[in-house]
Image (tube, rainbow, N blue to C red):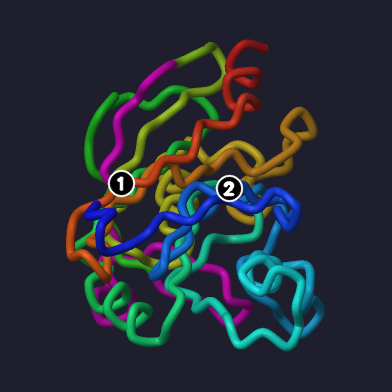
Amino acid sequence: MNTDRKKIRKISRKHQPRGLTILHDDDDIIVVDKASGLLTMGNSRTRDRTAYFAMNNYVRKGNPKSRKRIFIVHRLDRDTSGVLLFAKSEKNKRFLQDQWKNFSKKYYAVVHGNLVEKQGVLESYLAENAVHKMYSTDDSKVGKLAKTGYKVIRESSRYSLVEIDLLTGRKNQIRVQFADVGCPVAGDKVYSERDVRVRRLTLHAGTLDVIHPGTKQKMTFEAQLPAYFDSLLNK
């Protein structure tokens, strides 16, 4: 990054939000590592216990009258942890969203069982039913194409740690497609049977490669793999 043009800000510990670790902060963007269990943005039941609300408060340094604000570029599910990017202007938000399909996103997941093929691409058409649950279909007129590249990193007798390249960005595609092959993401309460031994959804947005909206240079942001993933494999 060209630091002559875009000053990287010193991270304020005083207003550091709970459930979020700030990875990068400059004039144009702010990047965080979101904890599992925290919404990206509000819904009809929750407004203030979200990453968006917390980061707005952070950039305003506790001053509710401040005109500073952030803009949502993308979202992570409540129970997915990892890299989450916000823009600091509408212009930067539009640039990042327009380029989003060209950016590289790498996830990590602990899945049940052991995959027969240790590396490959999962491909299906995904559709959404009346209760907003995703499912795979062979009908391209009903669903949208979803492609998920994966590589097994580590295995135990009960679980596997996989590195995932998100080749398309469909809703819940990782969770649906691994469930389809009989290796659902551990801790998934929607696409798998409940496992009382697993205390969280083991899906993590590990790295994100983007073009910086100000400098137009490539930047990579990384959120460390949660220690719980290793502990689950070691059990």
Residue 217 as seen in the image, left or right of residue 155: left
Mark 2 vs mark 1, foreground winner is 1
Query: In which quadrant of the rendered view does residue 93 lie?
Result: bottom left
Mark with earlier residue (2, 1)? 2
Picture layout, residue 233 above or below residue 13: above
Three-letter amino acid code at the position of disc 1: Thr
| Mark 2 secondary-structure assignment | strand
Q: Position of residue 140 (x, y in %)?
A: 24, 75
Q: Residue at x 27, y 78 (%)?
A: 95
Give coordinates of residue 141: x percent, y percent: 26, 82
* Residue at the far front in the pictured view: 4
Question: Within 10 Å of the Cα at label 2, are there few (<14), some (14-19), or many (20+) other Cα atoms?
Answer: many
Disc 1: which residue:
220
- Residue 87 image-quadrant placement: bottom left
Distance, label 2 to label 1, CA atoms, is: 17 Å
Q: Is disc 2 in contact with disc 1, using a CB cutoff of under 8 Å? A: no
Q: Which mark is residue 81?
A: 2
Residue 32 in sight in this render = yes
Q: Identify which residue, 202 or 119, lies in the foreground.
A: 202
> Which label sits on residue 75?
none
The verdict on residue 144 being magenta is yes
Q: Secondary structure at mark 1?
A: strand
Q: Which residues are magenta?
A: 127-154
What residue is rendered at 59% in x and 31% in y? Answer: 226
Measured as percent of width and height from the top left, residue 21 is found at 61, 47
The location of residue 13, given as percent across then percent down, is 70, 48
Residue 1 versus residue 141 in the image, above or below: above
Name the dominant secondary structure of the magenta segment.
Answer: strand
